C-alpha cells in the first residue's frame, strides 16, 4: 500500500471581515439610523412646542400682572409684556396691530392669535387658533394651550379686587 503524505502548502490565514459581514453591519446601522433619526426630530419638535406654549402662558401672566400692578392697560399690547416684545424681535410672533399678535409654529405664521378685546368697559385677552393648518407642530401647540383660562379679564366687571 502506498501512503499519501499531505503537504501543508503554508496557506496563511488572515483575521479579517468578509464582504458579507461588512454588508450585514452596514444594513443594521442603516436600520438603526432609520429608527433613531425621526425620533430625534420628534423630540426637537416637542421641545419647540413646549417653549412656545410656556412663552404664551408667560405672556398672558405678564399682561395680567401689568394690568393689575400698574392699574393701566396700554393701547399697544406689546408695551405690557417683555416676553412678547422679545418674541416679536426674534420673529416667533408678529404684531398685526396694537391689539393682535400672531404666533408662528412650524410653517404656520398665525398658528395662535392673541387679541386684546375692548368693549362695554371690559378688556379681555383672548386666544384663537388657525383652524386651516396641516402643520404638525402648530397642531401640537394648539393641543397644548389651555383654552379654559381664556378669555382673561384685564379690566371690567369680572375683575376681583
Image (tube, rainbow, N blue to C red):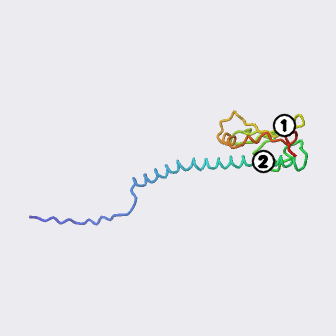
Give percent across and percent down for residue 55.
75, 48
Q: Which disc number belongs to residue 52?
A: none
Q: Nearer the viewer, mark 1 or mark 2?
A: 1
Q: Disc count in the image? A: 2
> Residue shown at 84%/45% (left/top)?
78
Quadrant where the N terminus is found in the figure:
bottom left
Left or right? Give the position of 61 relative to 72.
left
User: Which residue lies under the disc numbered 1?
Assistant: 117
Q: Is residue 22 left or right of residue 51?
A: left
Q: Residue furthest front?
A: 161
Is label 1 in a helix, a strand or a loop? strand
Badge 2 crowding class, 10 Å Cα cut-off, few under 14, some 14 to 19, many 20 or more, is some
- Alpha-carbon span between mark 1 and mark 2: 21 Å
Residue 42 rendering spot, x and y as whole percentages: 61, 47
The residue positioned 78% from the left and 47% from the top of the image is 87
The residue carrying pointer 1 sits among few (fewer than 14), some (14 to 19) or many (20 or more) residues within 10 Å by Cα, namely some
Q: Which sits earlier in the primary sequence, circle 1 or circle 2?
A: 2
Q: Quarter-wise, where is residue 160 in the image?
A: top right
Q: Which mark is residue 87?
A: 2
Which quarter of the picture shows residue 154?
top right
Q: Secondary structure at mark 2?
A: helix
User: Seen from this angle, which residue lies furthest top?
Assistant: 132
Q: Nearer the viewer, residue 16 or 154?
A: 154
Residue 65: percent from left, percent from top: 84, 49
Q: Position of residue 90 (x, y in %)?
A: 77, 48
Amino acid at each position: 500500500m502506498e501512503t499519501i503524505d499531505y503537504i501543508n502548502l503554508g496557506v496563511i490565514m488572515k483575521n479579517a471581515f468578509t464582504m458579507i459581514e461588512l454588508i450585514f453591519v452596514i444594513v443594521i446601522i442603516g436600520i438603526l439610523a432609520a429608527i433613531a433619526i425621526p425620533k430625534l426630530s420628534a423630540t426637537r419638535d416637542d421641545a419647540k412646542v413646549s417653549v412656545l406654549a410656556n412663552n404664551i402662558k408667560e405672556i398672558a401672566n405678564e399682561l395680567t400682572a401689568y394690568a393689575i400692578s400698574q392699574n393701566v392697560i396700554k393701547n399697544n399690547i406689546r408695551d405690557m409684556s417683555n416676553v412678547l416684545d422679545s418674541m416679536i424681535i426674534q420673529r416667533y410672533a408678529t404684531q398685526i396691530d396694537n391689539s393682535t399678535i400672531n404666533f408662528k409654529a412650524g410653517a404656520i405664521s398665525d398658528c395662535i392669535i392673541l387679541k386684546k378685546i375692548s368693549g362695554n368697559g371690559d378688556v379681555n385677552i383672548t386666544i384663537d387658533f388657525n383652524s386651516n393648518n396641516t402643520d404638525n407642530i402648530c397642531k401640537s401647540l394648539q393641543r397644548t394651550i389651555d383654552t379654559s383660562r381664556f378669555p382673561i379679564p384685564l379690566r371690567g366687571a369680572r375683575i376681583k379686587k
